[in-house]
Image: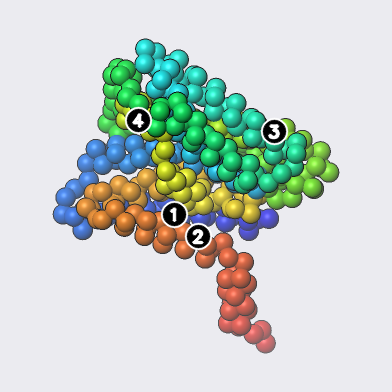
Amino acid sequence: MRAAIRQERLVPAAALLLVVVAFVLTPLGTGSPLTTFDVYNALQGFAQIGLLALAVGLTMIAGEFDLSVVGTYAVGGMIAVQAGQSSAVLGLLVAVAVGAAVGAVQGALIAWLRVPSVPVTLAAYIALLGLAYAISGGLSVTFTNRDATLWVDQTVAGVFSPRSLLTLAAFVLVAVVLGGTRLGAELRAIGGDRRASRVAGVRVERKLVLLFTTSGTLAALGGALLSFSFASANPDPGLRPLLIAAVAALLGGASLAGGRGTATGLLAGALSVALLAQIVAVAYLPDYSTQLFYAALLAVVVAIDSPGLRRALERVRARTRPVEA
């Protein structure tokens, strides 16, 4: 157990440290010093993917995987733009309410029918994309509320924006809830052994409904804020946001097997992904370089996470250990 705890802390810390060092050393390759705008831009990238990474990561902790987040992301952005033309707050609230409702329905189906999350959330993803196309007529919808667009991306303290601060606040809130209540331990228990969790008195069904409701809320909020920032909503964001969110969650110490992960680790994973993308931008590297960097970091994570590799290292240490006289 202690080894697992050390590992879920080691992976995100090591990944973030490695990327921060690379980011700081970028001027050695470019010849141009880093500016506050580079940091601001990296945090804008964090704001773009952070809430999706948090949503996906939370479901991974409980041994589930929410494929529908990209669909909720698209629908949330579309609804926020449609309903927020005159009042951005109203558009945001409606989008978040719809996202929460979508998540709650999925959570109820998964929990009470005891069916796997992947087919349920895949079906929801397809249905949500269809809904986004129906709402928009298959076209991007322009957001005409310029005050809201300017507000979400205005600079705060030189490097932040309201969008990045709201994303950071969501991580802090989740970290406080998971760390200060029994919920964090219960989600890990559900992800580790669901049957044992029920025997121990954990209300698994209720926790799963709450989990997917939270996931839908976060995804819709992320889509709404991004649409406000871009001043438009796209009915189909593609699968790339989901893939990057999954990479961030894995770098953040979560496991597809469940039972492991923290909100602070997920924050480190999301920041790592955002900083990597900014390194590519600052160094004027080809876009595909980002995917190569993600793959390299994931390879390191897989190596650290490999039980076979750990056993091999233990055997090597045992063989090289001095024999006592």
- Name the residue tied to disc 2: 301
Mark 2 vs 4: CB contact within 8 A = no
Return the disc, 1 or 4, that comes first in the chain's sequence.
1
Q: Give the distance between the C-alpha atoms of the residues marked 2 and 3, in whole angstroms.
A: 33 Å
Q: Where residue 14 appears, x then y in whole percent?
A: 46, 55
Q: Is residue 242 above or below residue 104?
A: below
Residue under pointer 1: 15
Q: Which residue is mark 3?
A: 108
Q: Is tag 2's residue or tag 1's residue first in the polypeptide sequence?
A: 1
Q: Which of the 4 image quarters holds residue 144? A: top left
Q: Position of residue 86 (x, y in %)?
A: 37, 12
Cα separation, mark 4 vs mark 3, equals 32 Å
**Which is more N-terminal, label 3 or label 4?**
3
**Residue sitting farthest toward the left:** 31
Q: Which mark is residue 140?
A: 4
Q: Residues within 10 Å of mark 4 (few under 14, many from 20)?
A: some
> Cα distance, mark 2 to mark 4?
37 Å
Of the 4 image quadrants, the one containing the N terminus is bottom right
Nearest to N terminus: mark 2 or mark 4: 4
Task: Give the number of the mark in front: 4 or 3.
Answer: 4
The foreground one among 213 and 37 is 213
Mark 3: few/some/many CA within 10 Å (<14, 14-19, 20+) = some
Q: How far across and how far down the image is residue 67, in percent? A: 55, 43
Q: Which badge, 2 or 3, comes first in the chain's sequence?
A: 3
